[in-house]
Image (cartoon, rainbow, N blue to C red):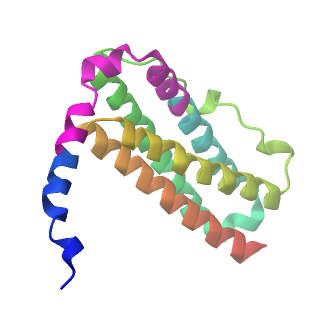
Amino acid sequence: MYPYHQNTQPAFRNALRARETAEPSLAELAADQRLLALLHLAMEETREREARFRWLAEHYPVFEPSQNILNAMALDEQKNHKRLQEIYYTVTKRRPESISPEDAPSTLEELDPETALEELLLSEMDQVNFYRNFLLAVPEGQLRDLFFEILTDKQNHVSGLTYLYSKYF
C-alpha cells in the first residue's frame, strides 16, 4: 500500500553496519584525553551533588517531610560515582583518584531553600544532556549500560526535584 516502506529494511541494516564500524574501541577511548578529563569532571560533580542533596535534606527544615527522597538521590549519586570509577577503570585499567563527599565543594550554605532547590534542579537537567552525550560516545555493551543507568538516575532526579519544587514553592 505504501511503496516507500518496501525498501526501508535493507537501508536500516546498512546503517547499523556503518555505525558499528565507526564506534571507537577501548584503546581509542583510553587515548582520548578529553574523554578522560570529562570522566574526572563527572566524578567530581557526582560527589558535589551527593553533598548538595545531603545538605538540602539536613539543613533546610522545610524539606524535613521529604528527607527520604533527597537521601535516596544522594545515595544514587554515591552509586553513580562508583559506576564512573568502574567506567574509568574499564577504559584505562587504572584506578581514578577520588575525593570524599565531605571534601566536595558546596555553595548551598548561603542560599535560601527555593533557590538551592532550583539550582539543583537546573544542574540535574544539564546533567541529563551531559550523560546522554557520554552514552552516545561509547561502544555498545557494558559501558553503554553503565552510562544508561546513570542517565536514568539523572532523569529520575529531575522528576523528583520538580515534584519537590512544586510541592514546597
Residue 94 as seen in the image, left or right of residue 163: left
Main SS of residues in magenta: helix
Residue 88 as seen in the image, left or right of residue 133: left
Residue 122 as seen in the image, left or right of residue 127: right
Residue 137 as seen in the image, left or right of residue 69: left
- Would residue 26 be counted in the magenta stretch? yes
Please determine whether, in this image, residue 144 is positioned above or below residue 167.
above
Name the residue: 23% across, 72% down: 4
Quadrant in which the C terminus appears: bottom right
Name the residue: 57% across, 43% down: 50
Please determine whether, in this image, residue 152 is positioned above or below residue 77.
below
Please determine whether, in this image, residue 138 is positioned above or below residue 148.
above
Q: Position of residue 151 (x, y in %)?
A: 43, 51
Quadrant in which the N terminus appears: bottom left
Residue 72 showing in the rendered view: no
Q: Position of residue 16 (x, y in %)?
A: 20, 47
- Would residue 41 be counted in the magenta stretch? yes
Q: Position of residue 119 (x, y in %)?
A: 74, 52
Name the residue: 50% across, 53% down: 154
Name the residue: 52% across, 33% down: 42
Residue 99 showing in the rendered view: yes
Magenta-highlighted residues: 17-42
Q: Position of residue 84 (x, y in %)?
A: 40, 33
Among the 4 quarters of the image, the one containing residue 165: bottom right
Number of numbered tags placed on the structure image? 0
